[in-house]
Image (cartoon, rainbow, N blue to C red):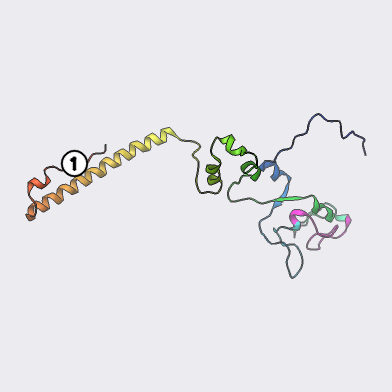
């Protein structure tokens, strides 16, 4: 083993790993919450102890038993997908879980001394909490051209709807006049609807 001085360094940086970096460390995705089958006492496939993701439970043996022995070292079984290696690799290997929605690390959201994410985004911590728990949302980008085009369309629709309402109102007034239930004086002060 090479000799090196553990006190000879200029700086050390500690940070949270990005999602892409975690995926690069991962051996596979955990898709099921199951751990071990209670009948066979073997790890469930795609579960939290999956041999395909984390490695074999027995040294130099795949999960189905097709490959046994050190001579098959490094071979991935076609049947079960488990690499033939030592069981010690289970201590080092990582898997990952794909979440349905993005999340925030609690250190960035609720720190005992400050609220770094709220400060970075320049919003109140209560508002940030609502966004993180899907009780509210933040608009990050507005397409002004599309908004103006939609506003023009909405104005046209509103004008058409108001014309329809005016026409319906006029028809109802005429019907009431024909029935003799109302006089002209009752409707003289009614003004047509406008889009303003």
Can you give x and y, in whole percent of width and height, for residue 72 in the image? 85, 55
* Residue under the image location 74 percent in, 37 percent down: 14
The residue singled out by tag 1 in the image is: 192
Which corner quadrant of the image does residue 83 belong to? bottom right
Q: Which residues are magenta?
A: 52-70
Q: Residue furthest top?
A: 10
Can you give x and y, in whole percent of width and height, for residue 132 in the image? 56, 46
Can you give x and y, in whole percent of width and height, for residue 109 in the image? 61, 43
User: Which is nearer the eye, 35 or 44?
Assistant: 35
Which corner quadrant of the image does residue 54 belong to? bottom right
How packed is label 1: few (under 14 Cα within 10 Å), some, or many (20 or more)? few
Which corner quadrant of the image does residue 125 belong to? top right
Q: Main secondary structure of the magenta part?
A: loop
* Residue under the image location 35 percent in, 37 percent down: 151
Q: Does 40 sit left or right of 166 as displayed?
A: right
- Relative to 77, is 140 above or below? above
């Amino acid at each position: 083993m090479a000799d090196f001085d553990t006190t000879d360094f200029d700086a050390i940086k500690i940070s949270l790993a990005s999602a892409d970096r975690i995926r690069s460390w991962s051996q596979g995705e955990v898709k099921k919450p199951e751990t071990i089958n209670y009948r066979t006492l073997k790890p469930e496939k795609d579960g939290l102890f999956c041999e395909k993701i984390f490695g074999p439970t027995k040294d130099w043996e795949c999960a189905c038993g097709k490959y046994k022995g050190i001579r098959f070292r490094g071979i991935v079984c076609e049947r079960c997908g488990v690499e033939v290696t030592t069981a010690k690799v289970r201590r080092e290997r990582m898997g990952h879980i794909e979440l349905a929605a993005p999340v925030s690390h609690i250190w960035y959201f609720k720190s005992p001394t400050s609220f770094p994410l709220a400060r970075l985004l320049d919003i109140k911590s209560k508002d940030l909490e609502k966004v993180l728990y899907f009780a509210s949302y933040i608009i990050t980008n507005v397409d002004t051209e599309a908004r103006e085009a939609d506003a023009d369309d909405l104005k046209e629709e509103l004008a058409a709807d108001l014309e329809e309402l005016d026409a319906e109102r006029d028809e109802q007034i005429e019907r009431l006049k024909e029935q003799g239930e109302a006089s002209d004086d009752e409707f003289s002060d009614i003004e047509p609807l406008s889009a303003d």
